[in-house]
Amino acid sequence: MSELRDLYQEVILDHNRSPRNFGELADATHDAEGFNPLCGDKLKLYLRIADDTVLEAQFIGSGCAISTASASLLTESIKGKSLAQTKILFHQIHAMLLDKQTDQSESLGKLEVLSGVKEYPTRIKCASLAWHTLVAALEQKTSATTE
Ligand code: ZN
């Protein structure tokens, strides 16, 4: 477990220090805002979707290291994925964070470090915020909250 904890801290710190795909996306086709009132994390996610594929994903916002790193990892991992793959990924992350069993045993790769947040139960919503915001954007809702 301590290896995961080290990796978790390393990845979270790295993505918080230099978030990937940070900034507004001018030609976004989908966007949504997310808010986690427990911690005060706010973010806005932009997607450019064409032919059922996520071509671009960017975000802006301010929040704790975990919420920023999770959003950064999210934008990295969904680019180039089909909408169906993106939704499967959301369900896998959601299940992982909530410790639910899934049929999918596929590796989540780097995203598995997010499971390190389970050692800090109050921060799980910080990690899941970006993913709920992603679903809101895909469903053309304007906002998401972790509550
Ligand atoms: Zn937070």
Image (cartoon, rainbow, N blue to C red):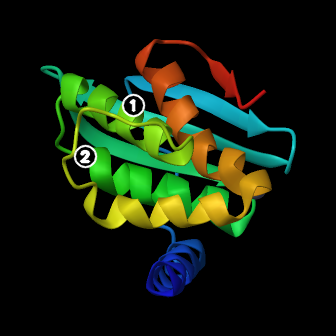
Ligand 1: give its quadrant: bottom right
Q: Residue at x 21, y 31 (%)?
A: 85
Q: Quadrant of residue 17?
A: bottom right
> From the viewer's perspective, is the residue at label 2 or at label 1 nearer?
1
Label 2, ligand 1: CB separation under 8 Å: no
Of residue 15 and residue 61, the one placed in the foreground of this image is: 15
Neighbor class of circle 1 (other Cα within 10 Å; few <14, some 14-19, many 20+) is: some
Q: Residue furthest left?
A: 51
Task: Answer left or right for 10 relative to 68.
Answer: left
Disc 2 residue type (three-letter):
Lys
Q: Is residue 27 visible?
A: no
Looking at marks 2 and 1 on the same chain, the residue that comes earlier in the sequence is marked by: 2
Q: Position of residue 18 (x, y in %)?
A: 51, 77
Disc 1 residue type (three-letter):
His
| Placement of 5 over or under 140, stated as above or below | below
Q: Mark 2 to mark 1: distance in Å?
A: 17 Å
Q: Is residue 36 visible?
A: yes
Do callouts 2 and 1 mark residues in contact (Cβ within 8 Å)?
no
Residue under numbered circle 1: 91
Q: Position of residue 78 (x, y in %)?
A: 29, 44
Task: Answer left or right for 103 relative to 26.
Answer: left
Assign a secondary structure to mark 2. loop
Assign a secondary structure to mark 1. helix
Residue under numbered circle 2: 79
Q: Position of residue 129 (x, y in %)?
A: 63, 41
